[in-house]
Image (spheres, grey):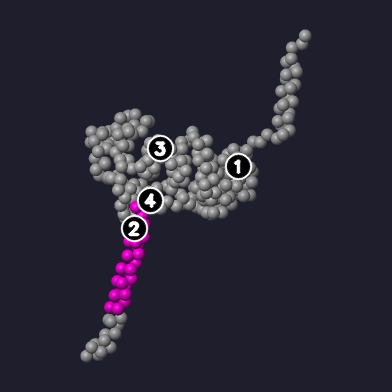
Amino acid sequence: MLYQFLRNNLSIVIIIICGLLAIAGYKVLSNALLSKKSEFISLDTTSAKVKTTNHRNGTLEIPKTFSHRNSIGNLPIPEISEEKRKRISALYDGNSWDRDPSWAKDGPPQEEIDILVEGLDNLSAAKYLKALGGYNGYAREYAEKALAENPDDFETLFIWTRLRDRNEDDKREAGYRRLLEMDPNFVPALVGLGSKLKKDSPEEAIELLQMANRLDPSEGLYELAWAYQRIGEYDKAVPMLKKAYERYNHRWMLSEIKSIEAGTPQIPLIQRESQEDRQNEADNKVDETLLTKPTR
């Protein structure tokens, strides 16, 4: 009887078996994904404890083991716990937008920062504030403290370097050079230093950016094109600009390409003094001295 039923309803049996196999496969895949998620941790903004988290819930996530070959400069925006939001709001009489007018110029008060980084070490505090945005001044302070505590830590040095202000070019350059001493193939440092040098030392910048681009063909595209333009190598600059445009889709990159093709490049050539120019300048100074020398 069972045999007769199976033979008459073979298609139904096949459908049932396929369904069971699909359910089993889904469970295996789900377990694999859960195992993968457990490799990530998040900073708990309520305490200093480390917890497992879902990557989609908006909390700050960092790998358990830092691999400095990956850029850590761009972190996901972390979540601020409700408890901390209430404490911060209380600083402004319950209205977090009712802040002192000096906030826009001087930044948030230290009390707000203390609440945000409560329970975090200096490096975690620097990364957390950088990820939040708008707190870079305080993030720099925590990065300074973290580097003082551990001056040879690669991750700390990278965060410290990335947080340098615009008027700290020398410090940023020194940071990138030190990072490359520790790892000559660290792409973010190659691009960072190349970008820093492309105006005044375009040849060195090109070497660094070419290496970065070899290691990661998606990196250093526009910076390399800019450096090529700086020394007048437009035949190399245009292909890099086109690649950069394909990746970033910035219209002003097309404008630079059109300017080069029209013979009116936007990036000025670097001005160099030849040995002859320097000698002529020295001779002129000698002549001026002789002309102004008092006669007896």
Amino acid type indicated by mark 3: Lys
Judge the density around disc 1: few (<14), some (14-19), many (≥20) Cα neighbours within 10 Å: many
The spot of residue 188 in percent (x, y) is 50, 47
Labels 2, 3: front one: 3
Please state if 242 lies on the left or on the right of 118 as rendered.
right
Cβ–Cβ below 8 Å for labels 2 and 4? no
Asked if disc 3 and disc 1 are in contact, CB closer than 8 Å, the reply is no
> At x 46% / y 50%, what residue is drawn?
68
Q: Specify the amino acid type for callout 2.
A: Ser
Q: Residue at x 33, y 71 (%)?
A: 25
Residue 153: give x, y in percent of width and height: 45, 45
Kind of element beneath mark 4: strand
1 vs 2, front mark: 2
Judge whether 83 appears above or below 92 on screen: below
Of all residues, the one furthest to the left in this rendering is: 1
Q: Residues within 10 Å of mark 2 (few under 14, many from 20)?
A: some
Residue where numbered disc 4 is placed: 62
Q: CA distance from mark 2 to mark 3?
A: 30 Å
